[in-house]
Amino acid sequence: MFKKILIANRGEIACRIIKTARRMGITTVAVFSDADRNALHVEMADEAVRIGAALVAESYLKGDRLIEAALASGADAIHPGYGFLSENPDFVEAVEAAGLTFIGPSVQAIRAMGLKDAAKTLMEKAKVPVVPGYHGEAQELVVLAGKANEIGFPVLIKARAGGGGKGMRLVHDAKDFAEALSAAKREGKASFGDDRVLVEKFIPSPRHIEIQVFGDDHGNAIHLFERDCSLQRRHQKVIEEAPAPGMHEEMRQAMGEAAVKAAKAIGYSGAGTIEFIVDGTDGLQPNRFYFMEMNTRLQVEHPVTEMITGLDLVEWQLRVAAGEVLPLKQEDVSIDGWAFEARVYAEDSQKGFLPATGTLSHLRFPEQFVRVDSGVREGDTITPFYDPMIAKLVVHGPDRATALGRMEAALAQTEIVGVTTNIAFLEALCRQADFARGDVDTGLIDRNLEQLNTRELTPDLFIAVAAIASLKPGRFSGSQDPFDTLGIWSHWAAPKRVVHLASGEDFHELAVTRLSRTQWSVTAYRDVGSTLAPVFMELLSSANDVMRVDINGTLLNIRYLRDRQTLTLICQGKAYAFALPDISTADMEAEDMGDRIVAPMPGVIKQINVKVGQSVSRDMPLAIMEAMKMEMTLAAPRDGVIAEVLVAEGDQVTDGDLLLSLEPVEE
Ligand code: ADP
Ligand code: ADP
Ligand code: MG
């Protein structure tokens, strides 16, 4: 076995590999770019080597620097992780030429699967079913258009060197073929420097089911069952699961055998994935799955396979690369229960899944019933340089429903502040009816996008708590705790502050009134469209960022997390995010100290103590109001003379109503 390995990657996968290497007693060398100097994978590794600037082209894609770093640190082997150089045959050749072991398949195997047309021809020869289509030499329009007619529309034109969904064009009608062909060729040329294409039958609403395979250098190859990755957005996987819903033994055996045949056809060694497209319109049928491509590396979603088999695929990769025989035979592996993986990303699902950046000012993952593969810690920054994945949440359960329930709970209990994430979107997906039933296909997310992006309105109660929590400590006195601040808040009258909050599209201008030491009310202040109904609550305590409130006899513990411009409340596994627009509250404070006495909430005037023309001194009780079954005293905000009394005893008033006013102060 290797003594020391270099991990030519970053983020969660680098951390994931380090964990297994450490367990196996192998020393690890991390590499980092300037943007990753303080990254988790650097901290976790035994050693770390700087390889260049932040841009991947200057660091993680610099094969020569990676090899130099491996040689300089005395590593025996390089693990490429996924992405970056993991499927680059030139890199593998250079690694081997330097006398190092590449932890992955041979150069020949990577080359054989590198181009979609050659791979398909190879698979046809090996009697692995491929999507009906043309993947020959000819590239002339007349030939390809003729083939498209033979295949039958709709067809898919794919750049043979394509990846990540690029260089692909769907054509529904013969008249559009020529234009789509030039577009696919242009994109293939621009992205991969290769304009050759293939044409294949487009399978409507297919499922993406892939088989994990493993081979060794002694001619053995087995499969570790399937993963269903049909939940995709723009050909990117979102939630993966194993086994596949609706899978039955006959189908599994057929797909498993085809995958092993594919691996054996190229003498495959190490971990690989055979991606199949499955026409699932009439359930899973053994004559309706087709080879799509092979990924000659560890897959992002490999943990779901680990969860159902109890195996460590990175350990297997290391053993096989070190020349060992596969640890188990086909008949020794079996499936236990069900597993899901959700990819938690820094992205805004409401804004076209735009990648988000920012600092993770607060980051908590649940600890029970979930495996968290992450490469970041609280305080780390999601930069524009790399994939904005924050973590993979992986759950397991005895059956699909239990596992899915655990996923939903794990997502609900994940607390991330500082960066916009897709967590709410993933939660909505977990609750989506077709997915919950196991009725999945690659179009599910697009068909339900609007529903998946619909957010429940934030309940008034949390808007009110947010308004209180938004009051900055120390703003009204020197105290650090906004709720125990004496001074104006301890006043026996009813001091009030105006707070501005945005919750999604809704903007609120709210009046927060401290009615007594523990009692607070929050009402919509000016009529700016806030539909908040008055909320009255008792704030029992607030310590360690947790407010304990009593609302109509219900006790709630609400965690609040403040960030310069945002406030997040977390309660009973749900997060509520608010933006705090930087609007000065000066006008309200001036008003408080000023001329007007306004009803802080709806209620009835019980008593009026003053008349027009009467001199009053600051804090003198002017009127008593009854609201929410309690009395509150309205006090004079300053010394002065009463100018107007606009209400009488017994009047019903609503919040914001002007009750009394003072003569303006002469300058
Ligand atoms: P998977 O099926 O494992 O998700 P993908 O093809 O989506 O496979 O890629 C796996 C990871 O590698 C993704 O995080 C993706 O962003 C990254 N990746 C894919 N292609 C490249 C590339 N050419 N360069 C860098 N990273 C890549
Ligand atoms: P890439 O190399 O870009 O990942 P793939 O050939 O693996 O390209 O296809 C990516 C995705 O496109 C698949 O996961 C599937 O959703 C869709 N797709 C590919 N081929 C077909 C097809 N023949 N019919 C329908 N959808 C397809
Ligand atoms: Mg693919």
Image (cartoon, rainbow, N blue to C red):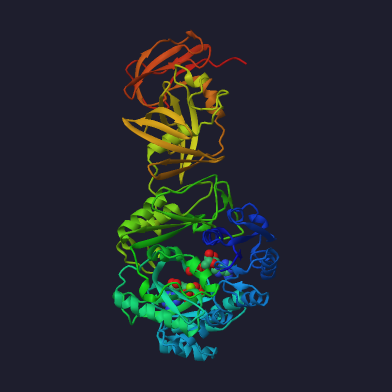
Most foreground residue, 644 or 464: 464
Looking at the picture, how far across and down is residue 552, in whole percent? 32, 30
In the image, residue 35 sits, relative to residue 2, either above or below, namely above
Residue 133 drawn at (x, y percent): 44, 86
Quarter of the N terminus within the rendering: bottom right
Q: Is residue 172 visible?
A: no
The mark tally for this picture is: 0
Residue 239, quarter of picture: bottom left
Residue 317: x, y in percent? 51, 70
Q: Is residue 33 found left or right of 365 in the rendered image?
A: right
The residue positioned 39% from the left and 61% from the top of the image is: 340
Point 48% across, 26% down: residue: 483
Does 180 sit above or below residue 478? Answer: below
Q: Does the image show residue 423?
A: yes
Q: Nearer the viewer, residue 409 or 159?
A: 409
Residue at position x 37%, y 71% from top?
A: 333
Quadrant holding the C terminus = top right
Task: Determine which quarter of the picture holds residue 458.
Answer: top left
Residue 187 found in image quarter? bottom right
Q: Position of residue 433 (x, y in %)?
A: 31, 59
